[in-house]
Image (tube, grey):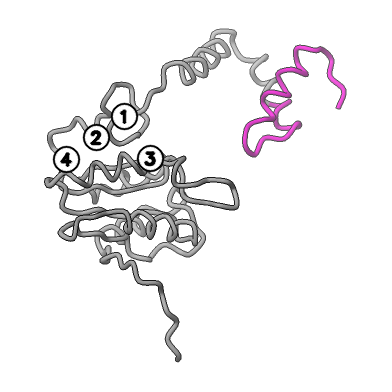
Amino acid sequence: MEFPSRTIEQAVQELSRLPGVGKKTALRLAMHLLRRPETESLNLSEAIKALRLNTRYCTTCHNISDEVLCNLCASLKRDKSVICVVEDTRDVMALENTHQYNGLYHVLGGIIHPLEGISPAQLNIGSLLQRCEDPEVKELIFAFSASMEGETTAFYISRKINRPDLRISSIAKGIPVGSELEFTDEITLARSLLNRIAYSTAPAINQPG
């Protein structure tokens, strides 16, 4: 692709690094920014800069936050006896949109995925186990995507918990296998939360039909 200037070429190269954005789409975005008022482009630039420099993570649940504690952990209205464990912040947003859950969260920052080089040591599992030692916590809910990696992560964490009195559950499998929480409709997510089942560490065994 030929560019009229080095400046346009650099902008296209950077924009095309975004997920799902090819060179042609990046060029359309760059030209769009040029046609818009200068203030709009500068506001976008400042927003991206602030995203990188000012974003921080809650010291308790690791959710994206503006303060040391996120607004969920700091809220006096949340049920602190329940912790819902999710892969990332997008899952927190998806579950909050159901308006069916009032407990706390714990963001792992990923799930165990050996093929991609993601091990338990790279996730926020240690801090979760510490939180589970608090006697105020009565239930742990695994809310992972229905995949082998999600099941592996839940199994690993459950085996690390040394509290027989802690109820461990998983959202009901109304979510299709292989789907992502962020793309699941709110009704399905709500039903999965309300109909969660006790989590078992025993491996699933296919029974003969």
Q: Distance between the residues labelled 3 and 1?
A: 12 Å
Q: Residue at x 48, y 17 (%)?
A: 47
On the image, the x and y values in percent for residue 203 come to 40, 72
On the image, the x and y values in percent for residue 84 come to 28, 49
Q: Compared to 116, does 195 lie above or below?
A: below
CB contact under 8 Å: marks 2 and 4: yes
Q: Quadrant of the C terminus?
A: bottom left
Which residue has dot 2 on it?
72
Q: Which residue is drawn at 48% across and 64% down?
A: 177
Q: What residue type is labelled 3?
A: Asn
Q: Compared to 145, does 104 lie above or below?
A: above
Q: Give the range drawn in magenta.
A: 1-28
Residue 12 inside the magenta-drawn segment: yes
Viewer-nearest of labels 3 and 1?
3
The one of 136 and 180 positioned closer to us in this rendering: 136
Dot 3: within a 10 Å radius of its alpha carbon, few (fewer than 14), some, or many (20 or more) residues?
A: some
Residue 172 inside the magenta-drawn segment: no
Assign a secondary structure to mark 3.
loop
Q: How far apart are marks 4 and 3 (CA)?
A: 21 Å
The one of 136 and 163 positioned closer to us in this rendering: 163
Which residue has dot 1 on it?
58
Q: Which amino acid does label 1 sit on?
A: Cys
Which residue has dot 4 on it?
78
